[in-house]
């Protein structure tokens, strides 16, 4: 592997006023060296990571980073902007900017190197040396660890107290990137000793028992877990900050940190957890296997809190332990809920739970629906009434094969509502929610409550399991709770509620909606198609798109869907094809308005759009959302309205143009798609044509000279 950073990747006079400009300028250096294959695609990934949480750190540091398919090898670029840039840090803008680019699926060695750098940023001698570096070669050597920081540079600058009130202190010996060693001092006992493991994959121990020489015979023992969305930088910087705070704690603290980064994680010894007096969770994604820490006094914060105020968190943990506080047990965190940002409201969590169920449901919809559609193509619609192939199957008859596909597809489709309900409950309450969720979904199918019944059953199951988990039980019963008690009670309650309380009203509402769809004609049908088209193109595969698509697939999930439901499905698929097709046409007609990368993306967008993969337009929307998204919505609305107006129907939930033979009024259906594509392309060209500068004018020579190795979107 080549060096992580070279002098060519350092800019000591960074000409940028915003974090986006800084990222672009540093990324262009990566492109010029062949480390990044698609500038705009990579910057879109950086922006997406930045949207999750600001990457500014106390001490004047900005550290934008991401994992991306557009990165060919782990790379670090460094810049000193002419004027500090706001990266969202509490103490102000940053005058040191690091851009970390990691390949998607990078191996542990690569991410270990990046995590080692993240830890070094907590050393004031290191950052002071970077601020005084005279040339790029010197700066890159410092970052690689080829040269040690000049301690006199750190002494010239006054120490900056952190929010917790403690002054930053020089660290001990820093690990070299090639030999990532734990930065802990020698532990006093075997519990926290892991000398053979790399830093990124184990909990590291810090064992200073006081800063004044009067060591306590029984130090305060803390176990901490740190994790961030990408697991590259903040995860390890939080660990480093906590370790330093523990070293400087005059009261004596023994700290063991488990870093749950992208390189994986090494579980802290259960004996260490058992002996711990308190636990600190500093995380912005799910804490994996959180139940290991149940029953301990717990401080639960975002990862940046551990970076900015570690001493305060240690004091809070000590206070909770002294008061005898305990975390609720054993409230297993929901996989999708635990990753929610601090302060997310109920509405945000509800959307996440529902999208969890939908994401697991969609493969069943696609597989079952396409098999049923193929069976109709081979044997006609009457094939749905064929005898069971288990009793009658002739290998040489097309009719038998059509019946086989239809019955397999019908079984797969039959899982749609139970899977939806089960994984909504899973998103709320983790694995204990699966059994009652599936049971409630199966009841919804039996009483013909359909898609709406599945939604309600999943929410009921998740809520009941969460309630049961909060009930305190004797220690002797805790082992059987998740295996026997929770599934038994929650399944019985959900089943009873669905059968005799809420199921029938929901079934009535489901039937009313089906009847309404079946009676759609004229203006009402066109308006519904327009709305579906707008939703399908609003976020290109995001939550709003999924709501419209789920509404459409829910309508055709019944054994005998009405004509209105089939029209809605046709409109949804047609509108979803428009954004990538429109972008492909626009790049073909006026390629000068697009960058070279976008023109390459346009070639792939033809295939993606024709296959009903709306995400094919995301690279364009990420680079220019204010023009691309409105244009896509305009085209989708036209297509959805025309499809409904033409009365086109569709029994397959996916497939794009490859299932056109199964579409009612196929020629008019293609006309609707073509019209929407023309509207999207025309609106995009119009909006891009009136701007003052095109992407080609803004792009650098480095960008234009670098041929992307892999076209984006493929």
Image (cartoon, rainbow, N blue to C red):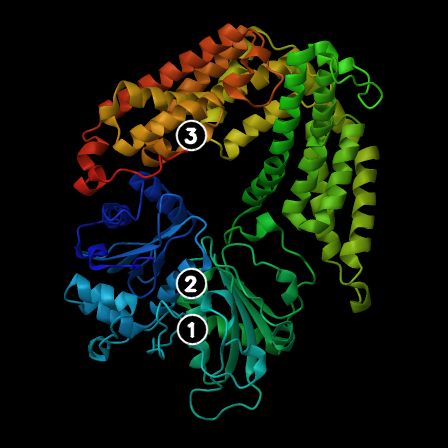
Mark number displayed over residue 226: none
Residue 702 is situated, as x and y percent measured from the top left of the image, at 20, 43
**Residue marked by disc 1:** 181
Mark number displayed over residue 112: 2
Q: Nearer the viewer, residue 516 or 540?
A: 540
Q: Earlier in the sequence, mark 1 or mark 2?
A: 2
Where disc 3 sits, the SS reads helix
Q: Earlier in the sequence, mark 3 or mark 2?
A: 2
Task: Quote the CA–CA distance across marks 1 and 2.
Answer: 10 Å
Which of labels 3 and 2 is toward the front?
2
Q: Nearer the viewer, residue 140 or 393?
A: 393
Residue 245, above or below 280: below
Task: Quote the CA–CA distance across marks 1 and 3.
Answer: 43 Å
Quarter of the image holding residue 289? bottom right
Does the image show residue 558? no
Quadrant assignment for the N terminus:
bottom left
Residue 248, above or below 223: below
- How many other residues sit within 10 Å of disc 1, few (<14), some (14-19) or many (≥20)? many
Which of labels 1 and 3 is toward the front?
1
Mark number displayed over residue 616: 3
**Residue displayed at 81% across by 67% down:** 476
Quadrant assignment for the C terminus:
top left
**Residue displayed at 50% across by 6% down:** 667
Residue 469 is situated, as x and y percent measured from the top left of the image, at 73, 56
């Amino acid at each position: 592997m080549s060096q992580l950073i070279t002098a060519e990747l350092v800019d000591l006079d960074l000409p940028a006023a915003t974090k986006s400009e800084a990222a672009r300028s540093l990324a262009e250096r990566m492109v010029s060296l062949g480390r990044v294959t698609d500038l705009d695609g990579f910057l879109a990934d950086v922006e997406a990571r930045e949207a999750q949480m600001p990457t500014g750190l106390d001490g004047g540091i900005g550290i934008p980073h991401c994992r991306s398919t557009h990165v060919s090898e782990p790379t670090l670029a460094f810049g000193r902007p002419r004027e500090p840039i706001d990266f969202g840090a509490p103490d102000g803008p940053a005058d040191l900017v690091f851009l970390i680019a990691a390949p998607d699926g990078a191996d542990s060695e690569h991410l270990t190197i990046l995590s080692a750098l993240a830890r070094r940023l907590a050393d004031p001698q290191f950052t002071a040396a970077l601020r005084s570096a005279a040339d790029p070669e010197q700066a890159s050597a410092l970052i690689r660890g080829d040269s040690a920081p000049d301690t006199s540079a750190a002494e010239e600058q006054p120490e900056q107290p952190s929010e917790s009130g403690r002054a930053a202190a020089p660290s001990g010996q820093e690990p070299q990137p090639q030999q990532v060693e734990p930065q802990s001092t020698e532990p006093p006992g075997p519990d926290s000793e892991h000398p053979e493991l790399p830093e990124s994959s184990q909990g590291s121990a810090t064992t200073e028992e006081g800063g004044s020489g009067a060591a306590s015979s029984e130090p305060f023992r803390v176990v901490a877990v740190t994790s961030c969305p990408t697991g590259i930088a903040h995860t390890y910087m939080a660990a480093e900050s906590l370790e330093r705070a523990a070293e400087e704690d005059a009261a004596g603290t023994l700290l063991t940190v488990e870093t749950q980064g992208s390189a994986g994680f090494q579980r802290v010894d259960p004996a260490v957890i058992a002996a711990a007096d308190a636990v600190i969770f500093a995380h912005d994604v799910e804490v994996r296997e959180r139940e290991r820490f149940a029953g301990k006094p717990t401080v639960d914060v975002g990862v940046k809190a551990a970076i900015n105020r570690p001493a305060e968190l240690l004091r809070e943990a000590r206070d909770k332990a002294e008061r005898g506080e305990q975390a609720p047990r054993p409230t297993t965190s929901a996989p999708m809920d635990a990753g929610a940002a601090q302060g997310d409201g109920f509405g945000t969590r509800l959307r996440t739970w529902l999208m969890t169920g939908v994401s697991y449901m969609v493969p069943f919809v696609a597989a079952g629906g396409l098999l049923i559609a193929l069976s109709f193509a081979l044997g006609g619609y009457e094939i749905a009434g064929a005898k069971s192939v288990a009793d009658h199957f002739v290998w040489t008859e097309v009719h038998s094969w059509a019946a086989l596909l239809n019955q397999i597809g019908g079984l797969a489709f039959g899982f749609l509502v139970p899977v939806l309900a089960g994984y909504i409950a899973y998103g709320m309450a983790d694995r204990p929610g699966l059994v009652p969720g599936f049971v409630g979904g199966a009841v919804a199918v039996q009483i013909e409550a359909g898609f709406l019944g599945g939604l309600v059953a999943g929410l009921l199951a998740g809520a009941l399991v969460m309630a049961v988990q909060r009930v305190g039980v004797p220690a002797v019963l805790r082992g059987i709770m998740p295996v026997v008690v929770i599934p038994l009670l929650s399944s019985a309650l959900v089943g009873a509620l669905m059968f005799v309380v809420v199921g029938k009203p929901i079934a009535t509402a489901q039937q009313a909606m089906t009847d309404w769809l079946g009676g759609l004609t004229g203006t009402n049908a066109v308006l519904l198609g327009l709305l579906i088209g707008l939703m399908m193109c609003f976020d290109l595969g995001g939550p709003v798109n999924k709501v419209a698509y789920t509404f459409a697939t829910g309508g055709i999930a019944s054994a005998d869907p009405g004509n209105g439901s089939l029209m809605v499905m046709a409109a949804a698929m047609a509108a979803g094809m428009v954004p990538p097709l429109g972008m492909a046409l626009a790049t073909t007609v006026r390629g000068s308005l697009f960058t070279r990368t976008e023109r390459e993306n346009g070639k792939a967008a033809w295939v993606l759009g024709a296959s009903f993969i709306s995400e094919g337009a995301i690279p364009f929307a990420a680079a220019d959302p204010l023009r691309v998204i409105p244009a896509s919505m305009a085209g989708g609305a036209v297509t959805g309205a025309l499809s409904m107006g033409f009365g086109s129907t569709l029994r397959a939930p996916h497939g794009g143009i490859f299932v056109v033979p199964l579409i009612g009024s196929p020629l008019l259906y293609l006309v609707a798609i073509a019209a929407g594509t023309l509207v999207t392309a025309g609106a995009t060209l119009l909006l891009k044509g009136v701007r003052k500068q095109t992407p080609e004018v803004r792009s650098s020579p480095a960008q234009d000279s670098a041929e992307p190795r892999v076209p984006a979107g493929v």
